[in-house]
């Protein structure tokens, strides 16, 4: 397995780990204590990778309450999608102490970050 870590050069730099077959649970163990969490993804990435990501998180001690899957594309950046995601988190029992893992890029990162920051 080839893994590459890229440092993002911003005011507060952070690493991005890229590679096939990564064990997310092991990677985040260096910075986060396992607890309750949810996976936020879209209808393209979720069916391909969410089950494996969930398994690696659970193997590392995370309690994954569920996966929130939104439609792919810019149209998901809407109040309806946002309020639906927040409602799902509440029904899952996730609190402000919980963690949201955004699985995907673009809209998933934008909307998932906004949901996490405002929940």
Image (cartoon, rainbow, N blue to C red):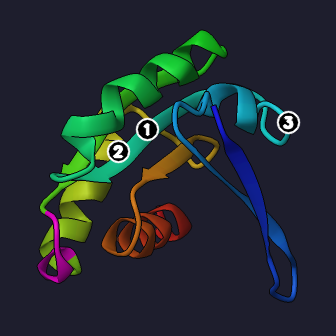
| Residue pointed to by mark 3 | 30
How far apart marks 2 and 3 lie (CA) works out to 25 Å
- Contact, mark 1 vs mark 2 (Cβ under 8 Å): yes
Residue 70: % across, % down: 18, 57
Q: Which mark is residue 59?
A: none
**Residue at 58%, 49% in the rendered image:** 96
Instruction: Identify the magenta region.
Output: 72-76
Residue 116: % across, % down: 50, 61
Residue 73 on the magenta segment: yes
Quick one: 97 or 73, which is closer to the camera?
Answer: 73
For label 3, count other residues whose C-alpha is less than 10 Å away and answer few (under 14), some (14-19) or many (20+).
few
Residue 103: % across, % down: 42, 50
Residue 22 on the magenta segment: no
What secondary structure is marked by label 2?
helix
101 shown above or below 110: above
Q: Which mark is residue 38?
A: 1
92 shown above or below 86: above
The part of the image, by quadrant, that contains residue 56 is top right
53 lies left or right of 73: right
115 lies left or right of 8: left
Residue 65: % across, % down: 39, 26
| Residue pointed to by mark 2 | 89
The secondary structure that most of the magenta stretch takes on is helix
For label 1, count other residues whose C-alpha is less than 10 Å away and answer few (under 14), some (14-19) or many (20+).
many
Earlier sequence position, callout 2 versus callout 3: 3
């Amino acid at each position: 397995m080839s893994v590459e870590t890229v440092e993002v050069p911003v005011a507060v730099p952070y690493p991005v780990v890229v590679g096939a077959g990564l064990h997310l649970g092991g990677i985040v163990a260096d910075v986060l204590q396992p607890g309750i969490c949810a996976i936020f993804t879209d209808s393209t990435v979720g069916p391909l990778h969410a089950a494996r990501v969930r398994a690696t998180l659970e193997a590392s001690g995370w309690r994954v309450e569920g996966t929130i899957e939104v439609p792919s594309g810019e149209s998901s950046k809407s109040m309806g999608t946002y309020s639906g995601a927040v409602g799902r988190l509440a029904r899952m029992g996730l609190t402000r102490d919980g963690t949201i893992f955004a699985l995907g890029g673009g809209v998933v990162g934008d909307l998932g970050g906004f949901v996490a920051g405002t929940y």
